[in-house]
Amino acid sequence: MNTAFQINDPRAVIEADRAHVWHHLVQHAPYASQEIDPRIIVEGKGLKLWDITGKEHLDAVSGGVWTVNVGYGRERIANAVRDQILKMNFFGGSLGSIPGALFAERLIEKMPGLSRVFYANSGSEANEKGFKIVRQIAHKRHGGRKHKILYRDRDYHGTTIGCLSAGGQLERNAQYGPFAPGFVEVPHCLEYRKDELGLGHLSGAEFGRAAADLIEEVILREGPDTVGALCLEPVTAGGGVIPPPEGYWERVQEICRRHDVLLHIDEVVCGLGRTGTWFGYQQYGVQPDIVTMAKGVASGYAAISCCVTTDAVFEMFRDDSDDPLNYFRDISTFGGCTAGPAAALENMSIIEDENLLGNCDAMSERLLANLHKLAEKHPAIGDVRGKGLFCGAELVVDRETKEPLPEGLVGAITKDCMAQGVIVGATNRSVPGRNNTLTFSPALIATADEIDHITDSVDQAMTRVLSA
Ligand code: PMP
């Protein structure tokens, strides 16, 4: 029997939501004034969703926030979670579980050079674990001095005050300060906006290496003996879908090694297949010290995140002295939920059994080709970029000046797509002088027809909105 909630009175659900749910990332005034209803999703299958009014949507953003990599309605995952939680749902603290052990082993097989998995629940939390590891190493090894954590302009690492302190997106941080000390910003690497970096004269690998060198300048300015780690997204997500330029990551790795700076790669979005390899960093041949992941780990079927480290990092915490502070004194209550690793094991098997990394590459080619075709037709598309099924189209008023398309127009385009039954994303609205990028991150099971349907809807929306 399907025991999912049945809807007898959709209106009552909508009104309960309007009265009591504080939704993420929106201003509620239009709900309160009855101008719009909160949209409630009731069912999903593959890339399709149905809302409470019965309207069908094609989801081009994997659950809104690049998460549902294997698509909706996966019985294999549901059954694995059901079986596991009936047997043993939870034990927190220092004890382990069968799915926890088995998923860690399989994950590490995909991550040569790394060896330890710390379980938590959200991307923010996994990143906080990484920051705490770096801080504790600074105390254990460097008298507390090598504690600074560098983060990049435009990158996002989460919603806690610690993660916002490492946040390079102005609109996420505004009004939430003061932030934690010891976090230092380094410049972004978006080639389309290289003028902002004073590197407008360079291109390709020359630009990539010079953009990485800007990080080294900050390390030298701060003092290498004070810098413990550099935390970066392999491909910046919410900051504008920014794949790194050629030559960038190799140079970043070189710089980190030169100054004994740990490389913490935030794979919360790229993790588990989004870019066509298991992890985004694997596209660029780098070897991180700390890797964090969340969204695609179990495709949203259960809440799970992981902070993964090398043996060298883990070994710094092995200590048989009597010091009562000698171990990593960290915990996450729901890191003890077995539903997470049970779902993650099945999610990983689906990616393998259905060759979703291969499909991701093939569909990425199609999506990027379609977006480039759209750019020939719509001068408002200033730049098309992406890696795997993680693509963006940056919208501008004028290709020469690159002035961002106003937020209202970007919103009108996504709204028009929504009315057509296609959900596309947009990043960094409301930051003057920053990009307005439509984002596309469909599930890795997307078909050619679905990709075409997504880009056709954007074509129609742009035609309607921009010629109005
Ligand atoms: N890192 C990145 C790159 C993200 O995009 C996000 C969430 N969008 C996070 C961390 C934070 O994840 P969570 O919302 O699960 O805390």
Image (tube, rainbow, N blue to C red):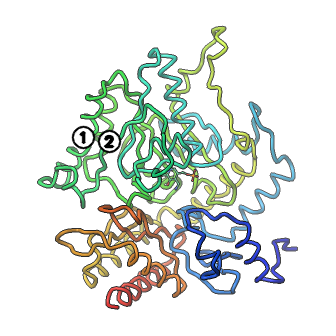
According to the image, label 1 marks what residue? 214
Q: Residue at x 34, y 56 (%)?
A: 243
Relative to 107, residue 49 above or below: below
Mark 1 residue element: helix
In the rendered image, which quarter is residue 50 located in? bottom right
For residue 143, side relative to residue 305 (left or right) = left
Number of numbered tags placed on the structure image: 2
Label 2 residue SS: strand
The mark found on residue 186 in the picture is 2
Q: Residue at x 55, y 75 (%)?
A: 59
Across and down, in percent, residue 235 comes to 39, 54
- How far is mark 2 from mark 1, CA to CA? 7 Å
What amino acid is found at the position of numbered circle 2 in the picture? Answer: Val
Let me know if residue 458 appears in the view: yes
In the displayed structure image, the side of residue 176 where residue 86 appears, left or right: right
Q: Relative to residue 379, is residue 353 depicted above or below?
A: above
Q: Residue at x 36, y 25 (%)?
A: 260
Residue 282 visible somewhere in the drawing: no
Specify whether 104 is left or right of 178: right
- Extreme residue toward the left, this view: 201
